[in-house]
Amino acid sequence: MNVKNIANAVGLSLPGQSQRLTGMNVAITGAAQGIGRAIALRLASEGANITISDLNLDGAEKVAEEVMALGRSALAVRSDVTVASDCDNLVSISAEHFGRLDMLVCNAGFIQVKPFLDITPDDLDRLLSVNVKGVYFSVQAGARQMLRQTPLGPGRPKGKIVTMSSIAARYGAGPMAPFTAPYRASKAAVVSITQSAAYSFAPDITVNAICPGLVETDMWKTMDKQMAALKKQPEGELWKQRVSAVPMGRGQTPEDVAGLASYLASTDADYMTGQSINIEGGLTMS
Ligand SMILES: NC(=O)c1ccc[n+]([C@@H]2O[C@H](COP(=O)([O-])OP(=O)(O)OC[C@H]3O[C@@H](n4cnc5c(N)ncnc54)[C@H](O)[C@@H]3O)[C@@H](O)[C@H]2O)c1
């Protein structure tokens, strides 16, 4: 075991590693992998205890073990964001276990690649259930809990909610546009829900959306595969094409997104609410 591992195993801070989230209790939906997992590990590395929730309980448990290896407390909960009572249960289990819920990250989502005219009513229902109703139910559950709590500190909000939108919410052009219409609509709805919730719950709760760009996760790999089949092009081609347009010169890592979540959790972001923040390497600059 090297020095870094020893320090992490007992929850000590290393020189240069911020511990600004010490004692915060955070729940994250869709956190068994990808962006949700990276947020869990980043916030835990800065001192937060984490409730990892997902449809995939095995995956959530593995991430909980990774959080515990950082010296923090973790809870894994199977929860389906399309079911309002699951969202309520997730919040009450987390708040009961850790005493309160300081931050909720509504991250669970999925994408379907299909031409605009081929989308069926069932396709639309399935996607909007996860990406729109799932976020709405989660925000409701989180806000009900947070409104009952005392502030995070003097002059601070009672809690923080972060939603996961996308540059797809406000960028209409590009090769993906004709094949991801319901996804784009769902992410625009997330921006709107975020604004309504921020206005409804200010000054008690801040609500902000993160809009990532091209993040190399299973979601992107699936999308790339489906586009390759549709456009009869080699797998990986779409990713290569899209990344070549990113001014920062590379695809996005889940850790790039987690850094913004860490800022939103911190006191530095206490005055920010109702915002939808792009983090996309300059791809859209919108
Ligand atoms: N990957 C990207 O390029 C990208 C870009 C912009 C926004 N996003 C958004 O970021 C979020 C995370 O994406 P990712 O790339 O990490 O995807 P991912 O597919 O790697 O992970 C999504 C997680 O959500 C879970 N999930 C799906 N449906 C669920 C449900 N009904 N209830 C609970 N959990 C459920 C999955 O099991 C999975 O663990 C999504 O909302 C996505 O739309 C991703």
Image (spheres, rainbow, N blue to C red):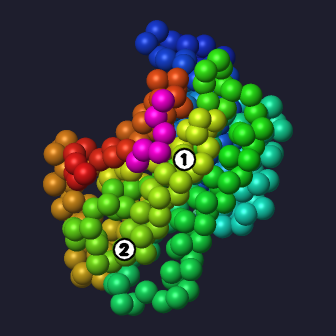
| Residues under numbered marks 2 and 1 in contact, where contact means CB atoms less than 8 Å apart | no
Q: Nearer the viewer, residue 274 or 114?
A: 274
Task: Give the residue pinned by disc 2.
Answer: 180
Question: What residue sits right under mark 1 in the picture?
Answer: 199
Which quarter shows the N terminus? top right
Q: Amino acid at mark 1?
A: Tyr
What is the x, y in percent for residue 30?
A: 59, 54
**In this picture, which residue range is highlighted in magenta?**
271-276
Q: Position of residue 94 (x, y in %)?
A: 76, 41
Using a 10 Å C-alpha cutoff, classify the residue at mark 1 as few (fewer than 14 neighbours), some (14 to 19) or many (20 or more): some
Main secondary structure of the magenta stretch: loop
Q: Nearer the viewer, residue 7 or 98?
A: 98
Is 274 inside the magenta-drawn segment?
yes
Q: Is residue 230 visible?
A: yes
**From mark 2 to mark 1, how far is it between C-alphas?**
29 Å
Q: Position of residue 173 (x, y in %)?
A: 22, 68
Element at label 2: loop
Above/below status of 175 relative to 240:
below
Residue 243 % position (x, y): 21, 54
- The three-letter amino acid code for the residue at tag 2 is Thr
Residue 191 in the image: above or below residue 11: below
Relative to residue 285, is residue 117 drawn left or right?
right
Q: Earlier in the sequence, mark 2 or mark 1?
A: 2
Magenta segment includes 59: no
Residue drawn 26% across the image and 67% down it? 172
